[in-house]
Amino acid sequence: MPLEGSVRIVQRLTSRGYNVEREAVTLLENASDPERAVDRLLETVSDDALVISIADVRAILEPDREESSGVDATDEEVSADRRAESTSGSTDPAVSGGKTPTGHDKSTGSPPEMEGFERSGDGSERSVQIDGDMTGESTGTGEYRDFVTVFRDRLDRLGSKLRGRVNHRPASSIESMPGGSDVAMVGLVNDVRSTASGHWLVELEDTTGTFPFLVMKDREFASMVEELLYDEVIAMEGTLADDSGIAFVDSIYVPDVPRTHEPSYADRHVQAALISDVHVGSDEFMEDAWNRFADWLHTEEAQHVEYLCIAGDMVEGVGVYPNQDEELEIVDIYEQYEAFNEHLKAVPGDLDIVMIPGNHDAVRLAEPQPGFDEELREIMSAHDAAIVSNPSTVELEGVSILLYHGVSLDEVIAELPADAASYDEPHKAMYQLLKKRHVAPQFGGHTRLAPEERDYLVIEDVPDIFHTGHVHKLGFGKYHNVLAINSGCWQSQTDFQKSVNIDPDAGYAPIVDLDTLDVTVQKFS
């Protein structure tokens, strides 16, 4: 049997919840009838078994040998079995026994491998660290003081990135300064409007009050005003008018990613697959494309892919948009997650997986979204994936990836000029969030925001990779050395998407080299 045969064997066994030693796969593959051998194995192996060993396979193959030859196994066959046993001993942790339910060796974290195919790492070099997971940390009650707290936290943290660049004065102090004075203020954008003459009036707010700044339309930075969103933090400096009631702007600053930002890289050649928007349960879920993706992950071409990050919308959900029930293949939300878990089982068990929720998932809609509750975590138990909040930052071997589902991208694209943000180039909308150092700056629009004691949506530290989904479009590029990727989806166009002119990029998997931050895109549709 060629490599594809061993892949099928592994997939069939892992789909039933078992992990399997490499040499056990070899014996099955070389059986006179591999399919029949797997059938017999599944009939005899215990439901409580975690790993199918070479002994389990030999037990069901021995009767075949006796039936075919009428005699005991030859010395050559016994020697071959002993050689197989010796290669699966404790000297090779990648194929030794004592595995966890995820298929990793308890002492080394090494995954089981398939005959003819070994994933690039042995597991000992892997490192997954999570930062910013607010699951279980929600404190907001929805009261007025909660909103005051979260906006003060936003102003303090993002303002600190700007106060060193300007001679900041609070709004109340600027009001008392004489005309002609040089002034600068760090604040939240409270209002933006154009004057009758085509100039821009921007009102900033801090904890002491508000103050208006006038941006003349002929200034070289006037175009920056068109890219402002309400509630983002900026700094403006200029000169007070003679009556001291307004300031003429000379400079505008945003928190931004420093142009000198130097990303981190992994110390070895290792890859991460970045996907989102699987939408299991939808009539338009692309099961065949997903299966091709899962099959590909089992091949030698994917041997360096050791991580999988899923940026939300594992399932289609229920009641997310009008008449959605007419487009559902699975109408029960829990059954949707059970089906997703079955599809996740097709992915190799030796990958490290990180998942965040999205707006179609069964969590609160307001961001930040805590990770799934215990009931759903138990359902989505395949491969022991790390389930964290939206957004969260995961550090893979020193490379930081900011995972955010991306609901605010709709708002950014709707509010800003087409050359700054569009669905055709979703990564450019992501650049805007990096500039603002906040994944969802505007409050009160389409993006639902939950007030917490801390603004978990602030981009405090510059990530090496920014990964989003939601808009079902594929796009990637670099902004000040930060790799921004929107990864498309696994759902073909729905009737609802047709009604709002969304033409999805479906069945794609961006693969990132963590040692170079180069991107290749694998297409499975």
Image: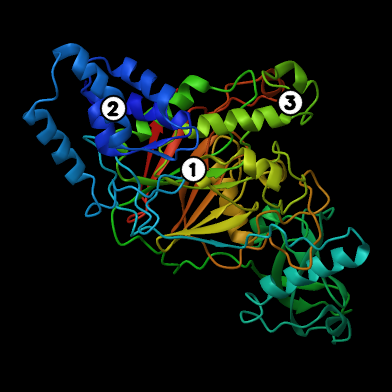
In 3D space, how far apart are the residues under numbered discs 1 and 2 (Cα atoms)?
Answer: 20 Å
Image side of residue 475 versus residue 188, left or right: left
Which residue sits furthest left? 76
The percent coordinates of residue 410 (x first, y second) are 69, 41
Task: Answer with mark 3 or mark 2, whichever residue precedes in sequence.
Answer: 2
Please tell me whether residue 368 is drawn above or below residue 83 in the rendered image.
Answer: below
Task: Residue under label 1, please give it.
Answer: 383
Instruction: Name the N-terminal-most of marks 1 and 2.
Output: 2
What is the distance, in whole Å, between disc 3 and disc 2 at their CAs? Answer: 35 Å
Q: Nearer the viewer, residue 32 or 410?
A: 32
The residue nearer to you, when weighing 320 against 75, is 75
Above or below 143: residue 170: below
Amino acid type at circle 2 is Ser
Do the numbered discs 3 and 2 sit on residues whose CB atoms are within 8 Å?
no
Q: For the residues marked 3 and 1, what is the alpha-carbon distance in whole angstroms?
A: 23 Å
- Residue neighbourhood size for the residue with mark 2, other residues' Cα within 10 Å, grouped as few (<14), some (14–19), many (≥20): many
Please tell me which residue is depicted at 58% across the width and 31% down the height of the picture.
340
